[in-house]
Amino acid sequence: MKFKPTLILSAATLALGITSGAQAGTLEDVQKRGSLNCVVSTGVPGFAYTDESGEWHGFDVDFCRATAAAVLGDAKKIKAVTSTGKTRFTLLNSAEGDVLWRNTTITFSRDVGVKLRFHGVNYYDGQGFLVSKDLGVNSAKELDGASVCIQTGTTTELNLADYFFANGMKYEAVPIETNDEGRQNYLAGRCDVYTTDASGLAATRSTFTDPANHIILPEIISKEPLGPATRHGDDQWSDIVTWVYYATVTAEEKGVTQANVDEMKSSKDPEILRLLGVEGNQGEELGLPADWAYQIIKQVGNYGEIFDRNIGPNTPIGLERGLNALWTEGGLQYSPPFR
Amino acid sequence: MNDNAATPKQEHEPGTHPNWPAPILTSGPIAWMRDNLFSSPFNVILTLLALWVLWIIIPPIINWVFIEAIWSATDRKDCWAQMSEPEAGACWAFIQSRLSLFIYGFYPEAERWRVNLCFVMLILFLLPILWDKCPGRKYLLWYCIAFPFIAGWLLIGGFGLTPVPTNEFGGIMLTFIIGVTGIFFSLPIGVALALGRISNMPALSTICVIFIEFIRGVPLIALLFVASTMLNYFLPPGTTFDLLMRVLIMVTLFSAAYIAEVVRGGLQAMPRGQYEAADALGLTYWQSARLIILPQALKISIPGIVNTFIGLYKDTTLVIIIGMLDPLGIGRAALADAEWAGLAREVYLFIAVFFFLCCFGMSRYSLYLEKKLHTGH
């Protein structure tokens, strides 16, 4: 047999020894690109979802828009890098995304082990229990012997075991994979109780045909502080994300809203003036235009407005502020001073 | 039937007997039912049981899918308000409101004519390839070779068209892009790998064996993860290599390795004499492969090849893991909209029907091709 010379494709030479990951200068990259890449979820009710025209909305997405408003002056210039729970950190660490706004619980291992930088808690969540009113239960302490729908392989599974063990109660686990599955199983009566983060429970309950017949028990059995994250190694960019979040909180505290932000520019309160860039040079120190926080509030709104628009009492999700009220109103949302 | 009874009197002259239809109990639907459904008491019971189960299942499904279904509504509550009771029927209004998202993903609205044009061109592309009596086939085949490149230009833009970043691709369009590209490029690569693997050149066959066995030994998900995340660690910082392109390459290589094994099966199923006859005729390697070996080997491999293609097509849904929104991903993101959330059944049924139509079409075509090419040995 005769062979003519065959073209053999040479393997692509991999540039060994070059470690990517943390690069300095995310701000310049974003400004050069003209759009902000946010790692968001593939879909969590109230936090990240698409509307009919394919626009992204939600609590997390609004914070992404706030970041874009501060950095690029235009809240529309975002690109949603959708991620699952498994891929979110690799997407961030491999620089596919500039910042992660994706209901992510801050934990020791994520902060230290995955080498992320977390920037405050923009939503305090916790694991709760959803039960039907027919069950006649008013407290999680009365759930001895109940069957519980629980997502496998999550921290909620471990929290549940701990809680029931600590209170000397027994339960029967009904393992489920996704939220939709949990909803179907719960409605079909395959479990008495559905447990996951309280915000998720409220969102799920809002999709029932008879939401009023189901209650979320008052006990919250775990701490799930959700917040934004960036890569290690770019302190300037980390500062920007941190203070974008603080700007929304401070604005609410000072009563600066989307509607009155222009009038507030002539306010007598020096902190408002510093926040809006009328006085001081805080924008410059961050490497941003002087009106960065003004753009956030003008285009997206303050913390309370973002909350109410996406997950507040008047939305189908219908969450109360609770722990997420300002510290002045008994909650935990607290911003260091703009000074 | 009454063979044992007394033979009836012959009333016709020999040769003038009219052709009577067969007795009703030996042909026609009644006979078929007697033979197949009610041939024994046990079968009678099974048949009645099956009819009863169908009677239980089918009317509620038809009722849910068609009769009680709502086709236009503003949100879930509105949808449920229009039904006799909430969830009594399907709320297709949800699918309708997201239809453009399901088809085009996040492709900019002003540029969607380009996607439409590509869909039309895809049909023109498939026609001459799948139908050998297509008029002007010779010329159209040239178009077929050019099609992937024209379609790529139309979709991505540049050279006079507004560029559209590939992360705005999504939905059915993304499924088609990955599926068609994978199928189009994996067949020639797979055939080349199969020929390489059985080649007499040790170096070539070793390379092919290593490649095929490596790809077959690693799950597609792992390859997709490598494509989406690991490559960025290897490439120099700042190099951007389009994610969709990486996925296309991985999917193509993955399916090429499987095609190679299917085709190798076909090559080995051919009698040794065919190879020797080709050599005896003095044909060169490429001539014998083109004229004698491959036409026969590929014909034997058709079911396996189409099987691999169907698998590849369904595997495109895996890209949701790396954050690309195929119809399944679009459905998930849409279900998170609190206005509509809770309509998971409608979404998944819609996607299932879409995939079923595509895959069933492929499998029927493969049957047709097998029959057409069957030469009786």
Image (cartoon, grey):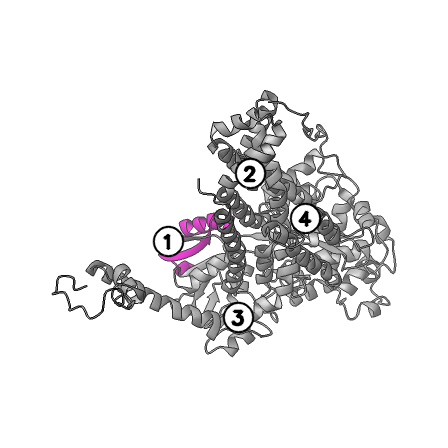
Pointer 4 local density, CA inside 10 Å: few below 14, some 14–19, many at least 20: few
Q: Earlier in the sequence, mark 2 or mark 3?
A: 3
Whole-angstrom CA distance, mark 4 to mark 2, is 19 Å
Chain bearing mark 2:
B
Chain bearing mark 1:
A
Whole-angstrom CA distance, mark 4 to mark 1, is 67 Å
B287 sits to left or right of A70: left
Q: Earlier in the sequence, mark 4 or mark 3?
A: 3
* Amino acid at dot 3: Cys
Q: Which residue is mark 2?
A: B295
Q: Which residue is mark 3?
A: B91
User: Is disc 4 placed on a helix, strand or loop?
Assistant: helix
Q: Earlier in the sequence, mark 4 or mark 2?
A: 4
Q: Which residue is mark 4?
A: B138
Whole-angstrom CA distance, mark 1 to mark 2, is 61 Å
* Amino acid at dot 4: Lys
